Amino acid sequence: MITDTKYVYMTQVMKAMAHPARLFIVDLLNEREHCVCELQEQIGSDMSTVSRHLAVLRNAGIIDSRKENNQVFYRLLCPCVLEFYRCVADMDHKRS
Amino acid sequence: MITDTKYVYMTQVMKAMAHPARLFIVDLLNEREHCVCELQEQIGSDMSTVSRHLAVLRNAGIIDSRKENNQVFYRLLCPCVLEFYRCVADMDHKRS
DNA sequence: TTCCTATTTGGCTAAATAGACAAATCTGTC
DNA sequence: GACAGATTTGTCTATTTAGCCAAATAGGAA
């Protein structure tokens, strides 16, 4: 059924990834961990907006953070989400 | 960059999957093709709502449809999206 | 043609999401 | 303790999404 825990959490993860900036963040964090200011520079939107994107990804359990001095570093918890990128890239190629 | 075609299409696919009813539909279509009325019976919401969910998935290139008499049958185009289910299930297990 | 069943679409309202600015918080430095 | 840099959170507005009802469309049967 739709209310299965399975679908509830899955939906949260999908929603968390369903934004170009957040997909970009996941890509960047796959290389190595980054602080918020580095991500903000790459993305180009307001720092507060980037922080909110990071909170969405963290709440979904996709990334985690640690503090070092006055900076916060984020890292990717589950690189497996990137497998989905390949699947979608294939889908894109097949489209007319 | 965020505006890359890669991220634009990926976002569309993620958004399309980011709903429990639509994840359920993808699961059902992975077994075999189904007509709208069968899906509506499983999901339990209004027929028009189910039809809209199907349109979202089709626009994203995830499913396709064919007509047979006065029924419309939907099928899953890319079973690879289901690989993501496993990844998320693992993530769920690791959560505290 | 008329009727019936299956599906889609128009139109509306409620809810969720995105993004910006300002204010608050946190940490190390002076 | 006051100050500066990095990050988060409060608040507001605009946009998007979900879901329902009713109406429209498409095929087949009478």
Image (cartoon, coloured by chain):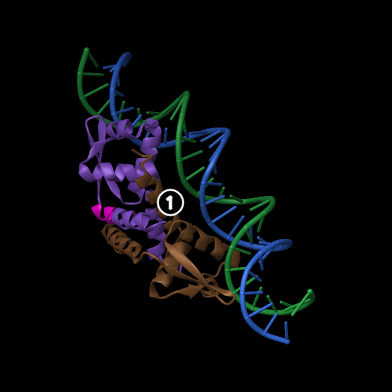
Chain colours: A brown, B purple, C blue, D green
Residue C28 in percent (x, y) is at 62, 81
Chain for disc number 1:
A
Crowdedness of circle 1 by 10 Å Cα count: few (<14), some, many (20+)? many
Residue A8 seen in the figure: yes
- Verify whether residue B79 appears in magenta: yes
Range shown magenta: B78-83
**Kind of residue at disc 1:** Gln
Q: Which residue is drawn at 27% across and 61% down?
A: A90
Q: Position of residue C26 (x, y in %)?
A: 63, 69
Q: Residue, x 40% and y 50% (percent of image)?
A: A9
Q: Note whether A34 is above or below C17 in the view shown.
A: below
Name the spot of residue A13 as percent of width and height, x first.
41, 54
Which secondary structure class fits the magenta region best? helix
Q: Is residue C22 left or right of residue B23?
A: right
Please state if A55 lies on the left or on the right of B31 as rendered.
Answer: right
Quadrant for the N terminus of chain B, please. bottom left
Toward which corner of the image does residue A89 lie, by quadrant?
Answer: bottom left
Whether residue A96 is visible to the viewer of this picture, yes or no, is: no
Quadrant including the C terminus of chain B: bottom left
Give the quarter of the image for residue A87: bottom left
The residue that appears at 44% across and 64% down in the rendered structure is A63
> Residue at the spot x=35%, y=44% of the render?
B22
The residue closer to the viewer here, A79 or A84, is: A79
For mark 1, what is the residue? A12
* Residue B83 falls left or right of residue D25: left
- Residue B8: in magenta span: no
Answer above or below: position of D17 versus D8: above
* Residue C2 coordinates in the image, percent (x, y): 32, 14
